[in-house]
Every structure is written in C-alpha cells, then in structure tokens.
Amino acid sequence: MRDLEISNQELSDLAEEALALAKAYWASLEERRTYPTTSGKQTTELFSRPWQESGRGREVLQDFKSIAEHVRPSTGRFFGYVVGSGEPIGALGELLAAVLNQNVTSWRSAPAATSIERAVVEWLAEAVGCPGFTGSLCGGGSTANLMALAMAREAKLPANETGVRPCVIYASEQVHMSIPKAVALLGIGRKNLRLIPVDDKFRMRTDALQAAIAADRGIGNMPIAIVATAGTIISGAIDPLPEIADIARREALWMHVDGAYGGLAALTVPEKFQGLSLADSLSLDAHKWLYQPLDCGCLLNRHPDIARTTFSHSDDYVRILSEDPTEAFAFFEESIELSRRFRALKLWMSLQYHGRRAYREAIARDLYHAQMLAQAIASQPELEQLAPVSLSAVCFRHRSKDNEAILRRVIARGLVYLSNATISGQFALRACFVNHRTTLDDVRAIVSEVIAAADELNH
C-alpha cells in the first residue's frame, strides 16, 4: 500500500470511532464547565510535542478526549462575545465538505459546491430583506468588512492600478475593531477613519455624521464611504439605517452595513432593520446567529460589476473557456480568496434540515432571553443595566463591588460564562445570547451567579 493510504476497513473503523467521540462530546456538553480549568503552561505541556518519524496510528484519536477537556465548550450557559453554538447538522456538513475536498474557486473547479454556495448566498440575502444582492461566503465579518471597503475604495477612488489616494471613511465610535484594521490594511490609514459620536442608545448620530462630512469637504478631503452598524459588538445597537442611507445617497458615498452580529436577526424582527436593503454592501456571520460551526461569514452586495473591478486579476492558467454564464462563473473574480473551502455545505444542510421557522424561532428565543435577563437585573437593587437592550446583548454591573473581580469569580465558578465591556467609562459585565442550547434556567443562573460571586468577595 502506498504511503498515506488507509484500507477501507481501517478507514471505516476510524470514522466510526471519530463519530463516537463527537456524539459523546455533544451528549456531555451541558455537564461541562463553561470554561476549562486550564492554563497556558498546562496546554503547552499537553499539546506541544515533536513530530515523530513513525506514525502513532489510531491512538491519535484518543487525544480528542484530552483536547475536549481544555477547550471552551459551546454549552447553553456560554454568554461571552458573539459566538454561535455550533449546530450539529452543520458540523456533520463540515465533515462531509472535508470529505469532498472541493476548492470552490469557480464552477469549473467545483460545479456542485459553486452552485450550492450561490444558492445559499441568495437565501441569506432574501432572509434579511435584500433580495437581488449577490456575494460570497468568507471566513467572517472581518474579511467581509475588508472586502466591502476595498469595493468602496475602487468604486469611489480607484487605487488598484496607481495606488491609494487620500480619502475618508466614516463610522460610529462603537464600530467593530475590524473596520480600523481594514482601513489600515487598505492603505487608507486609521487617521482617515472618522469615528462619529453616538446618542444615548449608542446609535450613530446622523447630525454629527453630516457635520463631519461637511467639515472634510470644506478642507478638501475626499469622503468615500460610511460604515453603519446593525448590531454593535458591545450593546447590539442598530444605527439609523434609512437616515444614513439618505446621507450616503446625497453625498454620493458608498454605504456598507456591518451586520456580522445583528444582521441575521432581520429574519425574526425585520422591523428593526428598515433600510438594510439600501446598503451597497452588507456583512453577515452565519456562525453567529445561524448557530453554524466556525467559520462562516458572508459579504452581500448590490454591485457585482464593482466586485469584479475590485478583485478580478487572473493569470491565463485559470482562464475559463466555457461561454455558458453559469459554467463561466468564478468566485475568485468577485472576492479576495482563490483557494476557498466548501463552507456552504453546512449551511445548505443545516438550514434545510431544520427549516426557516426553526431558525426564526431560535433567534426570537435569544431576543426573549435578553429581555428576561434585563428584567431580572432590574429586580435586583444591587445591579444596574448600563445600556439599552437593542438585540441580545445585555450590559450591566454591580453597583458597589469590583466588577472585574466579580467577572473573574463568575468564570472560576464555571456555571456561566460572561464577557466584559466598557460602557461610558465603566467596566461592564456582558451577556450575549446567540445560542440555540440556552434554557430559561440558564438565563436565571446569570444573576444568581453574579450575586453569589459578589458575596464571595466579602470572604
């Protein structure tokens, strides 16, 4: 047998063993701590080992049990960051995608995979009220935002051939960290990103936006784009999209909406997302509010011609000979990647397995859980809410105790996991609900754990 080949029987046995490990892990999730009791030293000692000349064979699968003891599990009591819960049908789809091993560069390279991705992108666009938008899947919101601003640059001040010229982009002061990073990577420069003040609901102030644009034009600067946010990473605030779209239209600016966190909630509460379809581009993360295994981001846009202008640069060896428009399609002509894995299969399988109603109701349940937590906080005199609950992120604090110390104690106790944020200069405890496994008891546990952790600080 040639090197790296495995007999059909041994491969079958390995697959059964791997699936048994997966099933046992899923079955154990709710019994696991929300964060492992581990350290950098311990994980380094466990997993840093030499690559040996001789293979270890099937015993390597047994490492999974040790790995599982040192990961952050996707239990229903994990409320940190904005991380989806890893829906299992999607995980099985991920396995099957790896089995097929498709490089989804173009229809020619991956006929079924390309067609499935284009269909899934169409589903997502329609689900958030943007029918007719096109686009592609990518690693996450950071990549989608980078591609969107590259398109904005090429649409308003082309730079691909001669280099970047000075220009200005506008975003809320609550904008995600990926936007300053994208502005830097594109050569525009972070000093040319204007961070616009927000109102008492943490939404971009359109009066301040208009004034900033006028000020830049007055001194000869070149505005090119506005980044609105549909679900800020800290509080879930949604910028006033119709008003921002009006400004973008009047000023001839590209409007990008970072909807990586909140955008897919439009499936359930479309009234909160009026104006989304007015954007030129929109980022979404299915690995957040469609609960998919990482990674699964998406960039939607209404300008495939600008996408091709921005990203098309091909050598002769990838020239497609077919004149059929479907068979001639290439993702590499409209996105930043050439090598692209079959991300769409997990979505294709998961969304069809459960159906649209199930996802709509799961998102509604997350929104309800956030409101339920806000009510529980209001009922406790020692706690206070620090920001409105626009979507599913809840920011609060203990009025009299060291909240950073409380957070460390909550995590150490292991029943629930919260993250932190800074709200108006104050350290906040933050719970975010994007988890299909969360129960009412899990939500109730948040306040009781915070109060218990605060009480422990007295001892």
Image: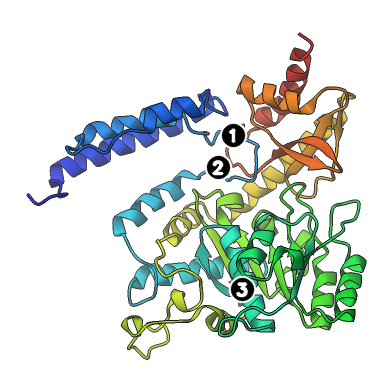
Is 303 positioned to the left or the right of 354 in the image?
right
Q: Mark 1 points at which residue?
A: 76
Mark pair 3, 1: CA separation:
37 Å
User: Cβ–Cβ below 8 Å for labels 3 and 1?
Assistant: no
Say if 325 sits above or below 450 in the image. Answer: below
Is 177 positioned to the left or the right of 197 in the image?
left
Say if 9 sits above or below 42 in the image. Answer: below
Q: Residue 358: tell me if it is visible.
A: no
User: Cβ–Cβ below 8 Å for labels 2 and 1?
Assistant: yes
Q: Quadrant of residue 133?
A: bottom right
Q: Mark 3 points at which residue?
A: 150
Say if 75 sits above or below 136 in the image. Answer: above
Number of the label disc, if any, that sits on residue 85: 2
Who's the residue at 7% across and 49% down the image? Answer: 1
Mark pair 2, 1: CA separation:
8 Å
- Per the image, label 3 sits on a secondary structure element best described as helix
Along the line of sight, the residue nearer the viewer: 19 or 254: 254
Along the line of sight, the residue nearer the viewer: 424 or 31: 424
User: Along the polypeptide, which appears first: circle 2 or circle 3?
Assistant: 2
Location of the C terminus (image quadrant): top right
